[in-house]
Each structure stands twice: as C-alpha cells, then as structure tokens.
Image (cartoon, coloured by chain):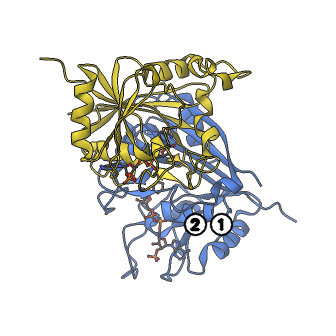
Chain colours: A yellow, B blue
Amino acid sequence: MTRTGRLRVHTMSMSLDGFVAGPDQSLDEPLGVGAMHLLHGWMFGTQRFRDLDEAEGREPADALDEEAVDAGFEGIGAWILGRNMFGPVRGDWGDGSWQGWWGEDPPYHCDVFVLTHHPRPPLEMAGGTTFHFVTDGIHATLDRAREAAGGLDVRLGGGAATVRQYLAAHLVDDLRYAVVPVLLGRGERLFESLDDLPAAYRVASVRQSSTVLHVHVERAV
Amino acid sequence: MTRTGRLRVHTMSMSLDGFVAGPDQSLDEPLGVGAMHLLHGWMFGTQRFRDLDEAEGREPADALDEEAVDAGFEGIGAWILGRNMFGPVRGDWGDGSWQGWWGEDPPYHCDVFVLTHHPRPPLEMAGGTTFHFVTDGIHATLDRAREAAGGLDVRLGGGAATVRQYLAAHLVDDLRYAVVPVLLGRGERLFESLDDLPAAYRVASVRQSSTVLHVHVERAV
Ligand SMILES: NC(=O)c1ccc[n+]([C@@H]2O[C@H](COP(=O)([O-])OP(=O)(O)OC[C@H]3O[C@@H](n4cnc5c(N)ncnc54)[C@H](OP(=O)(O)O)[C@@H]3O)[C@@H](O)[C@H]2O)c1
Ligand SMILES: NC(=O)c1ccc[n+]([C@@H]2O[C@H](COP(=O)([O-])OP(=O)(O)OC[C@H]3O[C@@H](n4cnc5c(N)ncnc54)[C@H](OP(=O)(O)O)[C@@H]3O)[C@@H](O)[C@H]2O)c1
C-alpha cells in the first residue's frame, strides 16, 4: 500500500490585521485592490521568483524566505485550489477560454484539482499540468488529489475560503504562512469561524526573517 | 500652554488568529476562558510582574519583553479603560462594592477614566489612583484624561471594544501589541471593522523576542 500523502499549505501571506486577500478581486488585481504587492512582496526576491522574467532588479531574499518558498515545492505530487484561485471567472465557465493565470505552461507540473460548483472538462496544459474541476466537495477532492499524488504530499494552494474549509475539517496536516508587517483594513480572513482550531492544531514555530514572520502550525492530533 | 499628551496603547496581547480576549469573560477568568495565561504569559517573567507576589519561580523575561512592559509606564499621566476592563459587573453598578481587579492600591497612581453608560461617583483609592466613570463618550473622556495628565501622555488600557473605538476615530497615536504564538479559536478581535485603518496608520516596527512578536503601529497622518 502506498503511503497517504499529507495535506500542506505553504507561503500564504497574511497582513497583521488578519487578511490573506484584499477586497474586490478582479482580473487586474487577483489578490484584491492593492494587496498583491503588499502581501507577496517578500517572495519576489526569492530565487524561484527571480528566475521569472519579472523579477529583474529585485533584492535577493532572506535565507528564511528562500527556505519557506522552496519548502512548498518539496515532495508535492498534486495540488488543490479553490476556483477563485484559478481565476476571476465566476458562475458558468462560459466559452472555457480562461485557462488560469499562469499561461501555457503553469508552474504545477502535476494534477491540479480545482474546487467548484460548476462542472468543466479537464484542461490539459503543457509541462504536465492538468486542471481537474471537481464538484463533489472537499473530501472527494482530497481523495482524488491523494490518489494522483501517488504517495507524495498534496499542496493546498488557497484561496482563503478553500483553506478555511480544510482547516475546519481538520484535514490540513501542515499550515505554513507568513505574517507581513502591513495593515489592509479589509478583505478575506484566513482565521474566521474556526472556533475549534485550537483543539486540533498547535503552533510548531514562529521565525522572523528580515521581511516577515514565518509561522508553522501543525495538526496536533 | 501645556503640551497635549499623546494617546498610547501598550502590551496588548493578540493570538495568531487575532484575538485579544477569549470568549465568556467572568470574574474567575477576566480574559475569557483559558486566555489569561496563554495571552499574557510572556509578561509574567518581567521585573514588573516578578515584583508582585505571584511571580515567584518564573523565568526572567527577554530584554525586549522587559522593554515593552516598561515602556507602557513611561511618561503616563492618566489612563482610559473600558468598563469591562474595570471588572466583570455589567449593567447597573449595584451596591458599588466592586472596586476593580487591583485591590486597595491599584497600580495606576493617577486618574483613571472608565468609559461606561452607567453613571457612578468617582472612586478614590490608595496610592493616588482615582477611578472616574465617564458616560459622555470617547472624545469627552479623552479630553478629561488629557487635562488630568497635565501634558504627560494618556495610556489607553483596553479592552478590545474601547481600543477599537479610539482606533476607528484615529485618536490613538501609538499602538504597541504583542503577537503571541497561540491559537484561541474565538473571542474578541482587536482588528475588526477597522476598514479605514491603513489610511491613517503604518507599521513602524516588528521585533521578535524569545516569546512574542512585538508590533509597533503608529499614526502616519
Ligand atoms: N495571501 C495568500 O497567500 C493567498 C494565497 C492564496 C490565495 N489568495 C487569494 O485568495 C483569494 C481567493 O480566495 P477565495 O477565498 O476568494 O476563494 P477560493 O478558495 O480560491 O475559491 C472559492 C470558490 O471555490 C469554489 N469552492 C470552494 N469550496 C468549494 C466546495 N466545497 N465545493 C464546491 N466549490 C467550492 C466556489 O466556487 P464556485 O461556487 O463559483 O464554483 C468558491 O466560491 C484570491 O484573492 C487569492 O489571490 C491569497
Ligand atoms: N489581550 C490584551 O492585551 C487585553 C488588554 C486589555 C483588555 N483585554 C481584555 O479585553 C476584554 C474587555 O474588553 P471588551 O472589549 O469586552 O470591553 P471594554 O472595552 O473593556 O469595555 C466595553 C464596555 O465599556 C463601556 N464603553 C465602551 N465604550 C463606551 C462609550 N463610547 N460610551 C459609553 N460606554 C462605553 C461599555 O460598557 P457599559 O455600556 O456596560 O457601561 C462597554 O460594554 C477583557 O476580557 C480584558 O481582559 C485584553
């Protein structure tokens, strides 16, 4: 029997006031108004981001930041995303021309399971990434992702609503996020209606880099 | 003309999930169920707390923690508290036998203004502390506290609801709090319905001690 992969969250970015996305998400501002740079700026100096075109001229990142970003790609065999993470299209998929934020060769290189209430055929991209649109809930989605991962771990990529559901069901094994020293005022909270969280999770570590506070929360039971 | 004192918040303690008090506050558990030790434990090793009876056998605190606690007593000429900070009595004051959590000689040694909707005569305690019960809102209370402070600063001691009101009105000059690496699940949030905060405040510093993350937020405009 193959090992059952763990379900892991990495590099979510949270403002001091608790928001992981700003308000009013749109095509131009996928994280909500003004939030992308404020929340994720700490990642832009890491090697993984510098390897992308847009990273030119950025300051090299802190070693802890590098480590946090790299850890999110180690031992991952499949991903789960909420539908809003996949894109700004809401409701029916329309002509199906939206193929995700990431262009022809998305950085997943494995099966990616997108939670949605709106069925859509799988979307095979270059580089080994296939998006599967799953309409039967978080448990079925996790089962399928685990099977696809073949013993490796499953990464839960967000967004807020999706991670919250898996946390509420105590299905996340490992939650790593970064507290960014900014205030957003409003947006999407990660820690909302998770009254029962302390019963099942404990804080494994908090480590300050030169940019953010890296928090590691793990399931205790 | 005397200098107008600043309004300062110090050593609030916030869980990673954003709560500054647990649920179900009561006489036995003033911070709500289980929250006192979890949230404020980092302070118990500081000199100021070790000087109290109950502090025996505690580990000495980190220098940053000492500094954070001490800073809250420097240059303060008056305090403002919300009524729930003053005690667990709700509604009418009844026979007025409740005189605060702190015994005959409270650690304020100055005028303390308690926000409430329920009038009550001033309460003069030993050591120079007088509790004034103010029923005409946050602005009038701040005016009175500033006058009493005679050019020194005013410390806003909590609780959550009271600090939130002064923050919403952009009347707090300096907010210092500690993020404690615990999860509470539910309770009172500090950052709630403060949509407009980023317009007036900026994060001045975040510094990790061996126990907590010390955050300093200041008014920018
Ligand atoms: N700060 C960070 O580190 C970080 C990380 C990741 C994402 N984000 C941000 O988070 C935001 C997206 O998060 P979000 O909370 O808006 O949404 P999300 O979790 O990405 O997606 C929510 C949507 O997914 C579908 N869905 C979720 N659970 C489902 C279920 N059990 N069954 C069926 N469908 C389900 C629903 O779409 P339908 O009903 O429409 O199909 C739902 O509206 C974006 O702004 C993103 O950029 C931030
Ligand atoms: N984590 C920390 O560092 C920290 C620090 C301080 C306090 N706390 C905790 O916070 C909790 C108390 O906070 P809280 O949010 O429950 O209450 P609070 O702010 O202490 O008191 C709220 C009460 O004060 C009165 N009040 C507030 N604003 C008023 C106004 N504008 N006009 C008239 N009356 C006003 C009202 O009482 P009435 O209408 O009944 O008169 C109101 O219910 C306690 O659990 C305390 O231990 C935590």
The local secondary structure at tag 1 comes to loop
Q: Is residue A99 left or right of residue A111?
A: right
Furthest toward the left, the residue is A1
* Residue type marked 1: Ala
Q: Residue at the spot x=23%, y=19% of the render?
A: A151
Q: Between residue A29 and residue B145, name the one nearer to us.
A: A29
* Residue type marked 2: Gln
Quadrant (top left, top right, bottom left, bottom right) of the C terminus of chain B? bottom right
Q: Residue at the spot x=58%, y=27% of the render?
A: A43
The relative height of residue B148 versus residue A145 in the rendered view (above or below) is: below
Q: Between residue A147 and residue A76, name the one nearer to us.
A: A147
The local secondary structure at tag 2 comes to helix
Dots 1, 2 in contact, CB < 8 A: yes
The relative height of residue B111 versus residue A55 in the rendered view (above or below) is: below
**CA–CA distance in space, label 1 to label 2:** 6 Å
Is the CB of mark 2 within 8 Å of ligand 2?
yes
On the image, numbered disc 1 is attached to which residue?
B169
Which chain is disc 2 placed on?
Answer: B
Quadrant (top left, top right, bottom left, bottom right) of the N terminus of chain B? bottom right
Q: Can I make out residue A32 in this image?
A: yes
Which chain is disc 1 placed on?
Answer: B
The x, y position of residue B6, in whole percent, is: 72, 57
On the image, numbered disc 2 is attached to which residue?
B165
The x, y position of residue B71, in whole percent, is: 63, 43
Q: Residue at the spot x=39%, y=17% of the render?
A: A74
* Residue B189 location, quadrant: bottom left
Q: Between residue B8 and residue A131, name the one nearer to us.
A: A131
Q: Is residue B37 left or right of residue A18?
A: left
Q: Residue at the spot x=71%, y=21% of the render?
A: A56
Is the CB of mark 1 within 8 Å of ligand 2?
no
